[in-house]
Amino acid sequence: MISSTGIPDVQQNMIHAPGGLFITVEGADGTGKTTHAGLLADRLRKEGRDTILTREPGGGGAVASALRELLLHGDDMADRTELLLFFAARSEHVAHVIRPAINSGSIVVCDRYTDSTLAYQGYGLNIPLEMIYRLHEIATGDLWPDLTILLDLDPAESADRLHDHNRMEGRGMEFQHRVRNGFLSLAETAADRYVIVPSSGPMEEVHAAVWDAVRARLPLQQTGCAGS
Ligand SMILES: Nc1ncnc2c1ncn2[C@@H]1O[C@H](COP(=O)(O)OP(=O)(O)O)[C@@H](O)[C@H]1O
Ligand SMILES: [Mg+2]
């Protein structure tokens, strides 16, 4: 974003090209993130927006994909190893996919990002949040989303929806409750970028609520377009 003086704003979150927008879809396992990130990206493209759909961990190329395999299906690892691997994958993702896209004016829809690390490794595994915020700054240059859609659902209901189970999902119900409540706390802390969408209704209803939240943000990103 260019300030009124014509000098590029140095704040990391303010360097998007006109039209660039970074949206994350968050929530515990089985809340519908992958479903709704996909529906949202389709909708944005239908509206003529240049949109990239990506996910974590694993978005960002070969190194990030290899890290995803380790994180979701690898053998037992120390909690801090897991934390560092998530941020290593995120660093790749931001450098190779997310920043280039928003800096060229695209909309990025990302299925999970740092809020998932705060919820799972912070609230879920009790790693101090300050440590996670510091790693986020190092790994991403402190890039935060413009908008975070939090899909919220009772873990009992999410469990009924899930068919495949990975390492994270195998941590049990109590863990899933801590993750859900962690996300709700994060939404309170960063209320300016969070929209909570209850995810228990039919897909069309949830999608409509997601779309309302996104549409409300879109015009703000268009005001800098030259000649428009
Ligand atoms: N609103 C909904 N109602 C019923 N089932 C849903 C809804 N949204 C998603 N699902 C189903 O729940 C399962 C988990 O959804 P998914 O998008 O993979 O969740 P996540 O990525 O958050 O783990 C999928 O089988 C999906 O089809
Ligand atoms: Mg998913």
Image (tube, rainbow, N blue to C red):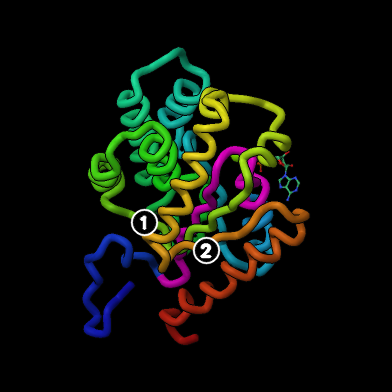
* Residue at the image point whose x is 41% and y is 28% from the top: 63
Q: Is residue 109 above or below residue 21?
A: above
Q: How far across and down, in percent of the image, does residue 73 sit?
A: 52, 19
Q: Is residue 16 above or below residue 110?
A: below
* Residue at the image point whose x is 72% and y is 35% from the top: 160
Per the rendering, the mark at residue 194 is none
**214 sits left or right of 191 in the view:** right
**215 or 106, nearer to the observer:** 215
Say which element carries label 2: strand
Q: Residue furthest front?
A: 174
Q: Is residue 228 above or below residue 192?
A: below
Q: How far across and down, in percent of the image, does residue 198 sit?
A: 63, 57
* Residue at the image point whose x is 39% and y is 40% from the top: 123
When asked about the image quadrant of residue 117, the answer is top left
Q: What is the span of residues highlighted in magenta in the rendered image?
A: 18-37
Determine which residue is flagged by label 1: 144
Determine which residue is flagged by label 2: 195
Say which element carries label 1: loop
Disc 1 residue type?
Trp
Query: Does 35 appear in magenta?
Result: yes
**57 or 174, nearer to the observer:** 174
**Does mark 2's beta carbon lie closer than 8 Å to ligand 1?**
no
Disc 2 residue type?
Val
**Label 2 neighbour load within 10 Å: few <14, some 14-19, many 20+:** many
Q: How far across and down, in percent of the image, does residue 83 sit?
A: 34, 31
**154 or 35, nearer to the observer:** 154
Query: Does 191 appear in magenta?
Result: no
Considering only order in the chain, which callout, 1 or 2, is on the residue closer to the N terminus? 1
